[in-house]
Amino acid sequence: MALGLGVLIALAGVAYAYRLRERAAATRAEEVERAREERSAAERERSSALLAAREEAHRLRSEAEAEVRERRAEVARVEQRLAQREESLERRNREVEQSEQRLSRREEELEQRRQAIETEREQVSRELERVSSMTQEEARAELLRGIESELDHEVAERIRAAEHRVREEAEERSREILISTMQRHASEQTGEAAVTVMQLPNDDLKGRIIGREGRNIRALEAATGIDVIVDETPEAVVLSGFDPVRREIARLSLERLFADGRIHPARIEEVVAKSRAELSDRLREEGEAACQELGITGVHPELVKLLGTLRYRSSYGANVLAHSKDVAAIAGMIAAEVGGDVEQAREVGLFHDIGLAVEQHVEGSHAVIGGEILARLGRPPAVVHAVRAHHYDEEPRSVTAFVVMAADAICASRRGARREALAASIKRLERLEQIANELPGVERSFAIQAGKELRVMVRPDEVDDDRAQIMAREIAKRLHAEGSYAGRVKVVVLRETRSVEYAR
């Protein structure tokens, strides 16, 4: 039993070993087959890679051969161009050599001609010296004297022409500057009188102003220095005097007395003193306002007060402070146009009539008095000189002096600026209108803008458009012939046709 079991086990082992051998043989066969397949795949890959490499090599060789052919063709072209250039250079060298040879022959010919000309010139010079009995130096000097005499006249003519041209250009430029300045600055002109009319609440106050036996009116006149005229004019009292400051003090005093109601000599003296103190403060405020308006700083308080006093001074019927501020503004504009000192021009324009504030107490020209006041109160020497020179009391030596003189003339010559010129200005305006009204077909005319423009209204049924243009030219010619205006006058002829109809 045991033997049979052993045999079985042995047989099982043999069978198992045989099966393992068969399995190993099958595995080896599979590995061999797999290796054969991998070798075959590798052979195929190597063949395809070899084929691709051959094709790439063939392509590279073709490209290289094409590039070599192109390079050879390019080299051939370059060699051909170089050959042509060398040939051209050789040809140019031959031409240059030929040109040099011709120039050399030409130089030799010119040198021979120059020598011949020098010889002939020497012969001509000797012959001229023999004929004229003058040496060459003497003849040259005589010729120069003749030329100089001719040139002197020509140079003088040119200088005169240049001076005339410069003068015309300067006049035209100055006219443009002045016209521009006058157009840019426009201000009202305030006329001044020698009397002040006080309006009364009622006529009963006239008796109280006069007082018992006239003591109140005498006290008021003595305290203010002003004549108080109480006449038949209803509810009015006239203050008469040539000192506007005193008139203002009298006016303020009367206003205080009217408001207070107490009118007697002692009260009058007290009120006049208060009014004088109030006016002093007002003068300072007026002066400070004028300086601030024109941007002038560092002014002495006494000078500020004198400037404010000009508010109550008049010259030729014009308010002096208003005139001074206008001159300062115009002088600044002109100085800016001509490249001068604008601030200095404004300062001189503002203070140029400062002497009028004290001229009734000091003898002499107001320009000289003003210069002395400015010098004493610490203003710059250039300002003092321009103020003293603005009426030629001192010879003007600066641009500012001439600028202020021009500004003063512009401001004083405007229409209505001075009372004495107002009537003449009105007559000139009337004359302009009269000249236009003399033409047939003119309905009416108006002189506007202080006589700078003349507008003419014509009757449309008598004057057509062409005739209106001719009429404007005729009026301009008549005005030019008349010469009764300053600057230029713009003539405008207006023709208007109206058609009116009513629907009923």
Image (spheres, helix red, strand yellow):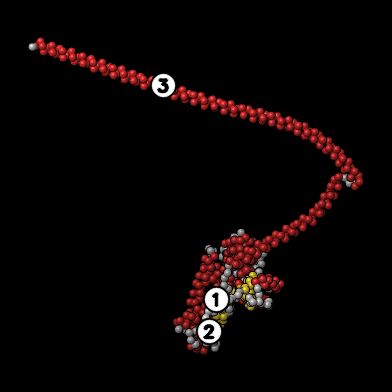
Residue drawn 43% across the image and 22% down it: 50
Quadrant in the rendering for residue 311:
bottom right
Three-letter residue code for mark 2:
Val
Three-letter residue code for mark 3:
Ser
Instruction: Please give the residue where the numbered disc 1 appears in the rendered image.
Output: 245
Label 2 and label 1: CA atoms lie apart by 18 Å
Q: Position of residue 275 (x, y in %)?
A: 49, 77
Label 1 and label 3: CA atoms lie apart by 132 Å
Could you tell me which secondary element the residue under label 2 belongs to? strand
Instruction: Please give the residue where the numbered disc 3 appears in the rendered image.
Output: 47
Task: Please give the label number shown on residue 433.
Answer: none
User: Which numbered mark, 2 or 3, is in the foreground of this view?
Assistant: 3
Residue drawn 11% across the image and 13% down it: 5
Residue drawn 18% across the image and 15% down it: 16
Relative depth, front residue between 279 and 442: 442
Label 2 and label 3: CA atoms lie apart by 142 Å
